[in-house]
Structure formats: structure tokens, C-alpha cells
Image: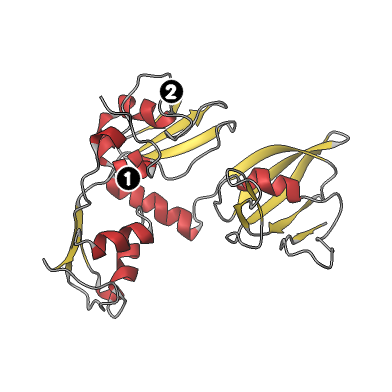
């Protein structure tokens, strides 16, 4: 039996055929832009690739990404099949379910548990446990996962049990009507509250690590100190964006009673406002 390919994009193994009618409100919009509105659970790059390869059709025909929609057209999305070896398998593992209904599962993820398989963690992840707990998740993009937590971070994860629930949750995250609040212990003496506005991306010196870099994507975190412990503080963080390792990277950007990075040659983009 061949070795499982976990280096591929992990969510490619969770694709579902679906269809939608273009609302009249989207009339005049480019097809690729309308697709991003109608299927927010998939990335724009993935949708454009499927459109170009013919796995997305407009009224039964292929169409260009720039094609303007009028409203009322029927879109059929039939993702390409994924090699079986790339599909994570269901594995029975203890799960702390805080809430479950027909649409959602809320999991209390412990520290030390990886959310999804990867090159360094091929199995025994939260995703594997979810597939065993609710096998129908195999038919939901990303197995219903709409947000992630780092391996060493504990907290609540919301998992969608249906495609429609997942689309609604993705939209709530995009519209910021769903809030994500985290608690962190940081070293130093940070300001009482404020907002850190700095781009986050791959560290040019160590690609497996994230860092504040001018090459990164915009990232914004609001924070307030809840309690101080001499050389450390308990900080509440509210994410306005969702970059990989955003809080951990931002903790290193928190200055001690400083407003912003003032080095003349610095291009890191760190800007902290607070009091």
C-alpha cells in the first residue's frame, strides 16, 4: 500500500458537489467574484482553478472568470475527485463536546492536540476524531472546520455539520459578527489596552515560522490587560483577522509601554495604539 500524501492541501480531501442560483443582487458582477460570494467555504484560488478546469459550469456550460453574471443563472460545482490516499481516516479519540445539534458541534480542544493532519502529524488529530464522531462530516468541505487553533492552544472550536451551516459560519467570520476571544500570558509590561496593527507572514529566515514582516498579510489584534504578575501579564486578545499564529506573533510585537516601533530603517509595520 502506498504512503499517504499528507503534504497536499489538507482540505482538498473534503469537497462536496453543490449548486446555486445567482441572486439578482449579484447581477453585473464577474463570475469569479460571484462564486466567492456563493461558495465562501472554498478559497478564491481554488474556485478559479475549478472554473478554468471545467469543474464549475454556468447554465451547463464552461465560462470565463471575467464573464459577467446577470442573475438567475444556475451554477453547478462538481469538484474533481481526490486520491483516496490523501483522505484522512476516522479514528476514535476522546472528544469533549460542549454543544451539539443538527447544525453544529462545539469542541473544547485541549492543548497538545493538532487540528488537522499534516506532514509532521499524519493522524491522531481533531479532524480524525471528528470523522469518527460524525461520519457525515466526510461530505462537508474541510470536514466542517471553519477555524483552527494551534497545537499548544486550548479553547473552543465550532464545527459545521452541514454545508449550509458552514457557509453561514464562514460568512459570520468574514463579516466579523462572530467574535474570537483568546487569553494569553505574555512576558513584559504591555500597555493596559490597545490595538496591534502589523502584517504577518512567513519568516524569511525560517519558513516554517510566522513573523511580523512587510511581506505579510494585514493582521489586526485588539488587546487589554486583565491582570499583571510582575514581569508578566494576563492579556485578553480579540482577533479582527485570522492569520496563522497571529496571537503568538503579536505577543512578540507588544512593546513595554511603547507606542510604536521608532527605528528609522525599520519596515516591520508594527503599530501599537494603547494607553
Q: Quadrant of residue 226?
A: top right
Residue closer to the observer: 122 or 151: 122
Determine whether 158 is above or below 79 in the image: above
Residue 35 lies, with reference to residue 168, above or below; the image says: below
Q: Residues within 10 Å of mark 2 (few under 14, many from 20)?
A: some
Q: How many marks?
A: 2
Give the x, y percent position of residue 45. 37, 60
Which residue is depicted at the point 74% across and 46% down? 252
Asked which secondary structure carries label 2, the reply is: loop
Contact between marks 1 and 2 (CB within 8 A): the answer is no
The numbered mark at residue 143 is none
Choose between 9 and 168: the one closer to the eye.
9
Residue 79 seen in this snapshot: yes
Of the two numbered discs 1 and 2 on the same chain, state the one appearing first in sequence.
1
What element does badge 1 sit on?
helix
Quarter of the N terminus within the rendering: top left
Residue drawn at (78%, 63%), measured in percent from left and top? 266
Residue shown at the point (69%, 43%) measured from the top left? 236
The location of residue 271, given as percent across then percent down, is 74, 62
* 147 lies left or right of 111: left
Quarter of the image for the C terminus: give it.
bottom right
Q: In whole angstroms, how far apart are the C-alphas of marks 1 and 2?
A: 24 Å
The answer to whether residue 233 is left or right of residue 26 is: right
Q: Left of 195 or right of it: where is 8?
A: left
| Residue sitting at the far left | 60
Percent position (x, y) of residue 108?
Answer: 50, 29
Q: Nearer the viewer, residue 218 or 202?
A: 202
**Residue beneath label 1, please?**
12
Disc number for residue 95: 2
Q: Is residue 38 visible?
A: no
**Residue sitting at 84 percent across and 64 percent down?**
262
Amino acid at each position: 500500500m502506498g504512503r499517504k500524501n499528507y503534504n497536499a492541501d489538507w482540505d482538498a480531501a473534503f469537497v462536496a458537489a453543490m449548486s446555486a442560483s445567482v441572486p439578482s443582487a449579484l447581477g453585473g458582477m464577474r463570475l469569479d467574484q460571484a462564486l466567492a460570494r456563493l461558495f465562501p467555504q472554498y478559497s478564491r484560488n481554488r474556485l478559479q482553478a475549478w472554473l478554468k478546469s471545467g469543474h464549475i459550469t454556468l447554465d451547463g456550460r464552461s465560462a470565463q472568470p471575467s464573464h459577467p453574471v446577470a442573475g438567475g443563472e444556475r451554477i453547478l460545482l462538481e469538484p474533481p475527485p481526490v486520491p483516496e490516499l490523501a483522505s484522512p481516516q476516522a479514528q476514535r479519540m476522546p472528544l469533549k463536546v460542549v454543544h451539539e445539534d443538527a447544525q453544529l458541534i462545539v469542541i473544547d480542544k485541549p492543548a497538545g492536540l493538532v487540528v488537522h493532519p499534516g506532514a509532521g502529524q499524519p493522524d491522531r488529530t481533531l479532524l480524525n476524531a471528528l470523522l469518527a464522531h460524525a461520519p457525515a462530516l466526510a461530505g462537508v468541505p474541510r470536514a466542517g472546520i471553519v477555524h483552527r487553533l494551534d497545537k499548544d492552544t486550548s479553547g473552543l472550536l465550532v464545527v459545521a455539520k452541514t454545508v449550509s451551516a458552514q457557509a453561514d459560519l464562514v460568512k459570520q467570520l468574514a463579516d466579523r459578527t462572530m467574535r474570537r476571544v483568546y487569553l494569553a500570558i505574555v512576558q513584559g509590561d504591555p500597555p493596559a489596552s490597545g490595538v496591534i496593527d502589523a502584517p504577518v507572514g512567513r519568516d524569511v529566515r525560517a519558513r516554517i515560522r510566522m513573523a511580523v514582516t512587510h511581506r505579510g498579510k494585514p493582521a489586526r489584534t485588539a488587546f487589554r490587560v486583565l491582570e499583571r504578575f510582575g514581569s508578566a501579564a494576563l492579556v485578553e486578545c480579540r482577533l479582527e483577522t485570522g492569520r496563522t499564529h497571529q496571537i503568538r506573533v503579536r505577543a512578540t510585537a507588544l512593546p513595554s509601554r511603547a507606542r510604536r516601533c521608532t527605528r528609522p530603517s525599520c519596515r516591520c509595520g508594527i503599530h501599537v495604539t494603547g494607553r
